[in-house]
Every structure is written in C-alpha cells, then in structure tokens.
Amino acid sequence: MTYLQSNNVNRNRGKKLVLIIITSAVVIIIAARFLAPSVFAGFFTAIARPFWRVEFSLSSGQLQSAESLLGANQDLQRKLDEADVRLQSVSAIVAENEQLKSLMGRASTTDVVLAAVLKKPPFAPYDELVLDAGTDMGFVVGNIVYAAGRVPIGKVTDVLSDSSKVLLFSSPKQTFNVLVGRSDAPAIAIGRGGGQYSAELPRTVVIEKGNSVSIPSLKSNLYGIVNAVIANPSESFQTILFSAPVNIYQLKWVLVERK
C-alpha cells in the first residue's frame, strides 16, 4: 500500500510539473508576442523557413525528376528552333522584297519584264541562265538581261514558248567593249567565266582596285568592279581583272529588256 501511494504521488507531481512547464511556455510566448513582437516574428520565421522552402520547391517544380527536367529542356529547345526558323523565313522574305523593289525601279522607266531564274551556275552549263518566261512574254533573241541595280549580265540566246536561255557576258571567250576607271579608258573585256572578266590597257592609264567598269552601248551605271591590276615593268600593257557587282550564283530574279 505504501508503494502504491508513493507511485500516485510521483505521478501527480509529474503532471503538475508538465502543467507548470506548458503554462510557463504559453505565458512566455504571449509576453514575447506583445512585449517584443519583432523578436517573436524572427524566431517563428527561423523555425518555419525550412518548411516554406520545401513547399516552394514542390510548387515550382524544383524537385522534379531528372527525366522530367530533361523533357522540359528539350521542349524549350524545340520551341527556340521553331522561332529561329520563323525568323530566318521572315528575313528571307524581306531580302527578296528589297530585291524585287530594286528591280522594279528599273521596270518603271523601260519596257522590261520580271522573270524568275529557274537554273543558274553551277547547275546550268557554260555560264547560262534559264528563265521562266519566253515568247509568251514577248522575249526574242538578243534581249538584254539585267540584275538588280541596273547591272547588265547577259543576253537572251534561245527562246521557247514559256522559257528562255540567257548567255552571261562573263562566259569564256565572250568579248565586249568597255570603259574602265575614272577616265573611262576604252578596252576590250574578255569573259573568264563565273562573272569574272579581264581586259588590257596601256600602262600609262591609271587604274586602281575598286574602279568601275561600264558598257557604253548599254548606258549602264555599273557593269563591273576592278579587283586587281597586274602590271609588268617590262611590258607596255597592264592586265585588269574585274567582276560583276552581283553574285550570279545567288540570282533569283532578273529583268529582260524587250527591244
């Protein structure tokens, strides 16, 4: 009996001690809440911060698996690739529009027809172009063909009902009278292929790299640009190398002058 009484007394004391501790803690928390609210808020925030971080990671997807993250990354890369393709398409359309505007500036003052280039070097032989228009557009052999910027590049040599063939002026062994340099020195240009030409002039004529070349009969503002001047002190002539100011390998449209 004495043992049971002692055990009950100890239990009551334990309950009272727990009650006192809980009560004291509540009183301290309430006192801190009113007397030092900033300290209480900081203490509560420090305890709750780790739980907030876990909750934020779950809601924002930071704790996703490696597979899901890889899939999301691939999806973003695909969207970037699609956007890049669209941007390139828009740029190509803008460039083509500018080229057509330049060509049609010539068309507004002369009787010319806009034609698309179906074949060009290196897919067409002997420095030739194949156009998508022929007798249906009034083309005849001998018509002069221009690139953007009023640059004469060749002439029609064969005409069908809905297509025509153009021989470029730069075709090998083709010869033309030209005017070279600031003094418009007359010379005979010889085609070297691929939009390249050569001509010979007396060494006394001053010719520099970058000088312009024109064809008098066509009244062209620009036919070629001097790329190099080769002069040998022991010879009385100098060789001029020049090329067309347009890239014939990138031609998409041309103008055919109907005369």
Image (cartoon, rainbow, N blue to C red):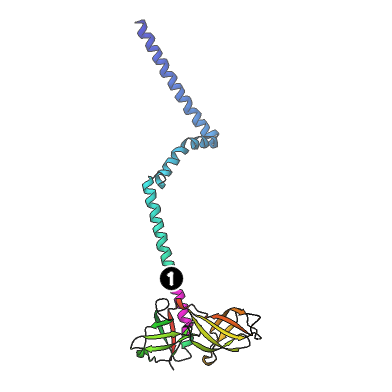
Identify which residue is drawn at 48% across, 25% down.
24
Residue 254 in the image: state x and y as whole percent: 44, 83
Q: Nearer the viewer, residue 81 or 122?
A: 122
Query: Quarter-wise, where is residue 112 in the image?
Result: bottom left
Highlighted range, magenta: 90-104
Q: Nearer the viewer, residue 115 or 76?
A: 115
The residue that disc 1 covers is 90
Residue 29 in the image: state x and y as whole percent: 49, 30
Answer whether residue 102 is magenta in the image.
Answer: yes
The amino acid at mark 1 is Val
Identify which residue is drawn at 52% across, 31% down.
31
Identify which residue is drawn at 41% across, 61% down.
81
On the rendered image, what quadrant is the N terminus found in? top left
Identify which residue is drawn at 43% across, 22% down.
19
Q: Nearer the viewer, residue 19 or 79?
A: 79
Residue 219 in the image: state x and y as whole percent: 54, 91
Answer whether residue 188 is magenta in the image.
Answer: no
Residue 172 in the image: state x and y as whole percent: 47, 83
Q: Is residue 178 left or right of residue 168?
A: right
Query: Quarter-wise, where is residue 35 in the image?
Result: top right
